[in-house]
Image (tube, grey):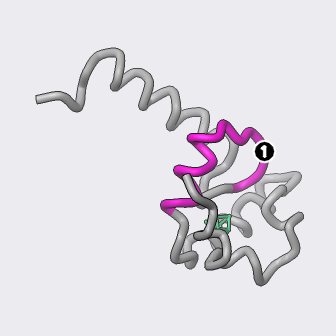
Amino acid sequence: MSSEWMADGKCREYPAEVFFPRDGVGVIKAQHICAECPVAARCLEYALENHIDHGIWGGRSERERRRLLRERRRRRIFNIDAH
Ligand code: SF4
């Protein structure tokens, strides 16, 4: 996946550390910024595809991305999306 979309990320207007928060309040702050980002969906897919463990990507925390990956794996294993 190309990373050209990064140039349009809302996070470019903030210091990088905002997206690597140390507590829950920091996570919420970063997620509010991501909520206004025009490339959030691509950002999230990029983080999932590249197994990026740290930081807020696409408005999702590390824990949320792990949960998403588990859910996708489960859906693949049980072929839930196939009709
Ligand atoms: S979704 Fe968040 S982390 Fe991703 S590009 Fe947008 S502002 Fe940056």
Q: Residue at x 58, y 58 (%)?
A: 2
- What span is colored magenta in the figure? 41-56
Q: Is residue 21 left or right of residue 78?
A: right
Quadrant of the image occupied by residue 3: bottom right
Looking at the rendered image, the quarter that the C terminus falls into is top left
Q: Is residue 11 left or right of residue 75?
A: right
Ligand 1 quarter of the rendering: bottom right
Question: Circle 1 is placed at which residue position?
Answer: 54
Query: Could you say whether the residue bearing mark 1 is in a helix, strand or loop?
Result: loop
Q: Is mark 1 within 8 Å of ligand 1?
A: no
Q: Residue at x 67, y 76 (%)?
A: 7
* Residue 18 location (% of width, % of height): 83, 67
Is 47 above or below relative to 6?
A: above
Kind of residue at badge 1: His
Q: Residue at x 71, y 42 (%)?
A: 52
Mark 1 Cα within 10 Å, few/some/many (few <14, many 20+)?
A: some
